[in-house]
Amino acid sequence: MWEYYGLDAVTGHDEMLGDVTMPGARWFTGARLNFAERCLAQATDARAALVSVTEGGEPVEMSWDRLRREVADVAAALRRIAFRSATANG
């Protein structure tokens, strides 16, 4: 799965299975993953990024470009909030 989803190109890991205790097994310890980045890496013009349905039952499609812009806007807003918080407490 690590290779299938291209995670090996994103990050390394210390060990594949750090703790075999079930429940609570620890997989890919030391790995770091940006979930939004991995989702956006699958962008294609062949299909919409998201399809929602209005209350009236009409489907509404969102393009990958629009989704990418909206994700970037939210990320920028969260960074501004974190910066203000850090400077206020700092």
Image: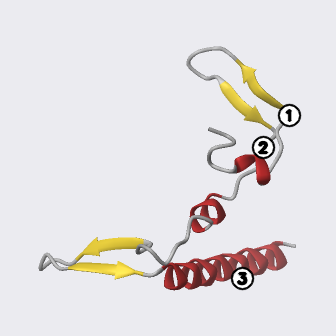
Question: Which comes sooner in the sequence, label 2 or label 1?
Answer: 1
Camera-nearest residue between 42 and 90: 42
Quadrant housing residue 41: bottom right
Q: Amino acid at mark 2?
A: Ala
Q: Secondary structure at mark 3?
A: helix
Q: Which residue is mark 1?
A: 14
Instruction: Judge whether 11 appears above or below 41 on screen.
Output: above
Mark 2: secondary structure = loop
Amino acid type, callout 3: Arg
Point out the tag, 3 or 1, that comes first from the N-terminus.
Answer: 1
Q: Amino acid at mark 1?
A: Asp
- Foreground mark, 2 or 3? 2
Which of disc 3 and disc 2 is earlier in sequence? 2
| Left or right of 88, for residue 76 | left
Give percent across and percent down for residue 56.
12, 80
Which residue in the structure is indicated by mark 3? 80
- 42 and 59: which is toward the camera: 42
User: Which of the image's four quarters has the C terminus?
Assistant: bottom right
Q: Would you place residue 19 above or below residue 29 in this image? A: above
Residue drawn at point x = 80 percent, y = 79 percent = 88
Read off the residue under disc 2.
Answer: 31
Quadrant including the N terminus: top right
Number of residues whose C-alpha sits closer than 10 Å to that of mark 3, classed few (under 14), some (14–19) or many (20 or more): few
